Image (tube, helix red, strand yellow):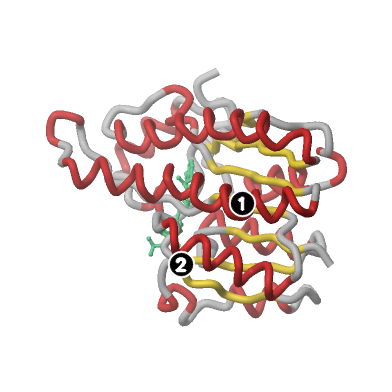
């Protein structure tokens, strides 16, 4: 059976992706930064109910050494890593003039450096397998920019460059690397927005609604499937027609 590792998958988009890949038949390696995230949380049980294996690997994805040992542990548990979804991400919003160095650095570390960390180690497993799928969570903020998010949009734009670089470096080994760029999706991350911010956002969306986490998971499922075997280095916006 093939295995998928999804970072930041205790909740939100990551949990929806994990559930969808379980439905597709993958064994699932869940990850989040603390065990507490999985307490009072039935994501692992829901995955096992799909008839696949599931295990939780706690790791701070911004930490290079922790990522190395997590990848080793996932490989030892499942025998292969066929899909890596770099999903973990944070926001520390603020206008540039008022943003602290800590706000900037923490977002770059969790959103951007994590992609290097995980892809380096899981990519090396995939190179030995001569197959693998890497799917990165970018954002429309990384494509178009967003006021109040110089840190976040920098990290998400970097992910696009990293996606194309990895696609070029690993393509000859049968490994694809693509990114999805969600727009405004209903999750705890976007629950933090004010009503006014939400209203302003909806006005710019052609479909006049927020996206659902399952709508991101569906595209990730496609990128992990046989049907996407010749798709690499691409960025797919999933935004209901935001900012066309
Ligand atoms: P979310 O609900 O906040 O989930 C992200 C998960 O990642 C959380 O469980 C979080 O744990 C975990 N995490 C944070 N730092 C971590 C670390 N250092 N190591 C391991 N796990 C860590 O976010 P989401 O809305 O589902 O977003 C998922 C991804 O999609 C992110 O990369 C985000 O940037 C991207 N995205 C989301 C939207 C949207 O509208 N929601 C739009 C575009 C892109 P803690 O809660 O403990 O921090």
Around disc 2, counting alpha carbons within 10 Å, would you say few (fewer than 14), some (14 to 19), or many (20 or more)?
many
Residue 2 numbered tag? none
Q: Where is residue 197 in the image (x, y as percent from the top left)?
A: 32, 37
Between the residue at mark 1 and the residue at mark 2, the CA separation in whole angstroms equals: 14 Å
The residue sitting at 60% across, 67% down in the picture is 72
Question: Mark 1 highlights which residue?
Answer: 85
Around disc 1, counting alpha carbons within 10 Å, would you say few (fewer than 14), some (14 to 19), or many (20 or more)?
many
Q: Where is residue 187 in the image (x, y as percent from the top left)?
A: 47, 54
Q: Which of 160 and 175 is in front in this view?
A: 175
Q: Position of residue 56 (x, y in %)?
A: 57, 75
Q: Is mark 1 within 8 Å of ligand 1?
A: no
Image quadrant occupied by the C terminus: top right
* 124 shown above or below 11: above
Q: Is mark 2 on a helix, strand or loop?
A: loop
Residue at the far left: name it: 98
- For marks 1 and 2 on the same chain, the one whose residue lies earlier in the sequence: 2
Question: Mark 2 highlights which residue?
Answer: 59
């Amino acid at each position: 059976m093939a295995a998928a590792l999804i970072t930041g998958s205790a909740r939100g988009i990551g949990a929806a992706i994990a559930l969808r890949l379980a439905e597709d038949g993958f064994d699932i390696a869940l990850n989040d930064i603390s065990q507490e995230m999985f307490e009072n949380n039935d994501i692992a049980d829901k995955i096992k109910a799909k008839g696949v294996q599931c295990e939780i690997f706690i790791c701070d994805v911004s930490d290079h050494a922790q990522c190395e040992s997590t990848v080793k542990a996932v490989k030892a548990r499942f025998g292969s890593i066929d899909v890596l979804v770099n999903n973990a991400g944070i926001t520390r919003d603020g206008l540039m003039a008022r943003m602290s160095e800590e706000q900037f650095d923490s977002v770059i570390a969790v959103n951007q450096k994590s992609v290097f960390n995980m892809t380096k180690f899981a990519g090396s497993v995939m190179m030995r397998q001569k197959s693998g799928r890497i799917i990165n969570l970018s954002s429309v903020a990384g494509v178009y920019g967003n006021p109040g998010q110089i840190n976040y949009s920098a990290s998400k734009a970097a992910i696009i460059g990293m996606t194309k670089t990895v696609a070029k470096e690993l393509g000859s080994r049968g490994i694809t690397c693509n990114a999805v760029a969600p727009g405004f999706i209903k999750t705890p991350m976007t629950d933090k927005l004010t009503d006014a911010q939400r209203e302003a956002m909806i006005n710019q969306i052609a479909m006049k609604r927020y996206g659902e986490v399952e709508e991101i998971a569906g595209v990730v499922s496609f990128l992990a499937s046989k049907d996407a075997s010749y798709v690499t280095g691409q960025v797919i916006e999933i935004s209901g027609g935001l900012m066309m």
